[in-house]
Image: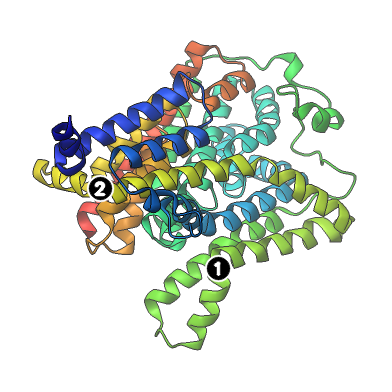
Amino acid sequence: MNATVDWLRTTTPGLLVLCGLAIAVLLFAIIKVKLEPFIALLLTGLGLALAAGLPVSKIVGTAIKSGDSLLETGFGSILGHIAVIIGLGTVLGAILERSGGADVLTGKLLSIFGERGAPIAMGLLGLIFGIPVFFDIGIFVLAPLIYVAAKRGGRSLVLYAMPMLAGLSMTHAFLPPHPGPVALGGLLEVSLGWLILMGFVCGIPGFIAAGIVWGTYIGKRVQVEVPAEFLIRPEHAESAKAEGPGTATDPGATRTETKAPHVATIGAIIAIPLVLILGATFGTQLLDKDSQLLQVLTFFGTPAVALLIAVLVAFYVLGVRRGSSVQELSTLTAESLKPVGMLLLVVGAGAFFGKVISATGIGTALADTMSAAGLPVIVLAYIISCGLRIAQGSATVAIVTTGGIVAPLVAGHGYSQMSIALIAMSIAAGSIILSHVNDGGFWIISKYFNLTVKQTLQTWTVLETVLSVVSFAVAAILFAIVS
């Protein structure tokens, strides 16, 4: 018995077996037992730490001091990095949505592309509006506009929905301030500026292949009508939105009695944090480290500061200047932040699980095995992320768990920030592959776009897989060139 325990704790094969068992237990707890991922990750992390023989004082600290424990540093290190960013990003998305920004963007894009180019317009709508808005919220807000566009165009709802969904999915998986990319920034210690750059570079080809090419192809072959109950009068849209389909608003209509914001205003507000963060990233590369300009760019390009500026601008331009009181904006902020709590706990628990994996030496064991097999780290990261996504359905769980496993393989190997960002993109790409019945998003899309399970598999599941594979291929090619 002791020999078996020693083998598990001290040898490369044994540590890999421990890691495999821990992941199997995690998946069983989430899929079969239906435990919340936060609880499942926490229990599995603690169990793995004990099984690997880590001292209790290292796992949870002592009765007097616990600040250096894996439990607190695992949660604290990642939450300190992402909590403010995700919170501010959520508030920014809420004020943009409440102001009618989606309606304005839709109307403008449709006027540019016309009825024949409406699917492309819907794709760009998802891509632009998806930057500050969470994936499921984006569906709730944009679905009514898709209904109207499909009804006017007289073609299948799928033709209009798939490009928009590709845009939302791409931004959700690859771009800050969404939880997955932000968490990877903390886990892999890569700047959000590089994640934004590589997110666009890797994600845009995937978006075109999945949303425009595949969306157009399948939209002509899967015919889905817009049910009459999905189309209701604009004035009822807000009250109906919480109940699901049946919330269509005309892109030309506004959500309030005030004049709709100009499309340039919406675009500028969305661009503020991206420009500021990228300014700091490029400044670090181009300017002397003692430059006063670099200090300014670094301060304003810090993600939390950049998002705070965007939120304050949005509060004034889309709120106060249009008649909203500070009290109303405070209420909107509080409402928008309610769903964020569990998300942060899941990310924190995933980071703790990753810390345990690092502390047990499993990361080193994986690195040795990968090196012996000749498998590049970017491929390993993609495979692990794909496996976790397919098995348990949650993209966030797949990202934070894979990030924790891969982080020790990246640390100390001299990879550039660009190379690490590409590894992060491979993890993000794997986290969205093959959405099926264990993914909550699968059922939201089925419900909101009047699809049967078979039709959802034919359309959405394939779309996610195309987006994943193409984006990973771009990341892998670039990684081979720059590493």
Does dot 1 land on a helix, a strand or a loop?
helix
Q: Nearer the viewer, residue 448 or 144?
A: 448
Does dot 2 land on a helix, a strand or a loop?
helix
Q: Nearer the viewer, residue 3 or 354?
A: 3
Query: Which residue sits at x=54%, y=30%?
Result: 36
Circle number at residue 266: none
Q: Amino acid at mark 1?
A: Leu
Q: Locate residue 270, reporting x and y percent.
A: 62, 56
Q: Locate residue 352, reporting x and y percent.
A: 43, 47
- Tag in front: 2 or 1: 2
Q: Nearer the viewer, residue 282 or 107?
A: 282
Q: Reply above or below: 303 against 395.
A: below
Q: Nearer the viewer, residue 394 or 255?
A: 394
329 left or right, relative to 227? right
Query: Which residue sits at x=17%, y=44%?
Result: 10
The residue at which mark 1 appears reads as 276
Quadrant (top left, top right, bottom left, bottom right) of the C terminus: bottom left
